[in-house]
Amino acid sequence: MSLPDPAAPHGAPVLSRHAVAPPAPTAPAAVTEHPMTFTGTAGEYFRIWIVNVALTVVTLGVYLPWARVRTRQYFYGHTWVDGQNFEYRANPLALLRGYLLVGFLFAVYALSSNSERTIWISIVLALLYAALYPWVVRQSMRFQAVNTWHRGLNFHFLGTLKGSYFAYGLANVAAGVIGLLLPWAWHEQRKYQVQNLTYGQARGAFRGDVAPFFTFWITAVGIGVGSLLLIGVPLLALFFTSGSNPFEEDGFSTGLIVALGLGYVLFLLLSATSWQYVRGAIMKYVLNNAELGGVVRFRASFSPWRLAWIGVTNTLAQLLTLGLATPWAAMRRAKYVTEGITVRTITNLDEFASAGPGQESALGEAATELLDIQVGF
């Protein structure tokens, strides 16, 4: 419909909704997909692993930082995206200083906790560790990020100390007091990790919601409750329907001991399955909802249940071979996870600009390694 323009001279064209040409539709940006690949082999890694173990034992642990760096260099070096592999450039000497300090404090803690006269020292150290835990996690992330390179450009982690004390301090305390808040704590920690990660000048973003974390948690709890019923009901039936007294004068009967032993092993397997599922499900969800600079996203297609199966069977293989299957197990898991991830971009990866190199303290990394703190996805 055309409307008269009172300001226009007589005879001039009237304003019309069709007088201004509508903007031309913008063509959607072309998405390029780069499937990740992993080229490591069990035989090749076994040689690195066995040398690391031997030298760590011979040097009474002093070689451990070099072993960690060699291991990560192997895994990073065999992980490829768009024709380029990752690199790990940590300095083992920097790690060694952190390892020695953390190892010394742990030794003091262990020795002092064995005597009533010095147990106060172990209590002080335990409180100190609890108070510094968020700082340790943050330092570890900064160290790992700055030493991770791809295409000649390294990552950075810009998380603040305040954010770490919220995600790894307050959230953990809240989850410890109210167990139902554990999925919320997981969500806050993953958000803290992703949103503070940068690659060059591209900053990470997390588009995920807390609800799926509760779904993962409920599934894991369901497995735990189901395993207790699966194991407990037959044991109770054995206890009450057995014709003979399951408790003999000298202790438990042989049949009950065997049943309890089998039930305990089965419970461990189901618990491990539950935990492996949660780890895999969270990792997949985080990857599918993370992006870098608004131009890079990820698609994880691996199955958490398959990952749980790999984790449990890997553990069994390592137990049955007294640890010799560790390299094979590590390669098996790394290959399945890596090759289930695709990097999706709307820009050339070569266009990422550097934010400048930086050096980070290795103390946090040493603490997370020695104290087995999990800070990854």
Image: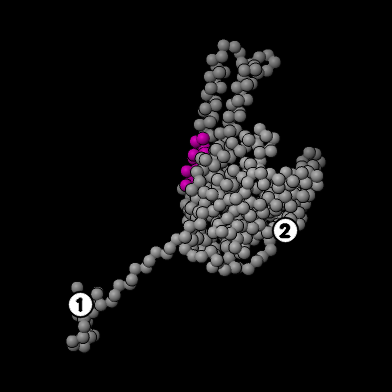
Amino acid type at mark 2? Asn
| Secondary structure under the numbered disc 1 in the rendered image | strand
Task: Pick the residue in front: 63 or 47.
Answer: 47
Q: Which label sits in the foreground, 1 or 2? A: 2
**For residue 358, which quarter of the picture?**
bottom right
Q: Is residue 151 above or below residue 321?
A: below
Q: Alpha carbon of mark 1 to alpha carbon of mark 2: how far?
A: 74 Å
Name the side, left or right, on which 170 lies relative to 54. left
Q: Amino acid at mark 1?
A: Leu
- For the point 21% across and 88% down, which residue is it? 9
**Extreme residue in the left direction:** 11
Residue bearing the label numbered 2: 91
Q: Is residue 98 left or right of residue 168?
A: right
In the image, which residues are magenta? 212-223
Vertical placement of 186 versus 226: above or below?
A: below
Residue 140 is left or right of residue 117, and the answer is left
| Mark found first going from the N terminus, 1 or 2 | 1
User: Mark 2 falls on what kind of element?
Assistant: loop
Residue in the picture at 63% in, 68% down: 356
Q: Nearer the viewer, residue 31 or 225?
A: 31
Estimate the x, y position of residue 268 in percent, counting from the top left: 60, 33
The magenta stretch spans residue 206: no
Q: Nearer the viewer, residue 115 or 78?
A: 78
Q: Is residue 128 visible?
A: no
In the rendered image, is residue 358 in sight? yes
Which mark, residue 3? 1
Mark 1, Cα crowd under 10 Å, few <14 / some 14-19 / many 20+, is few
Residue 235 placement (x, y as % from top left): 56, 22
Give the image location of residue 209, x and y in percent. Answer: 47, 52
Queried whether the magenta region covers residue 219, the answer comes back as: yes
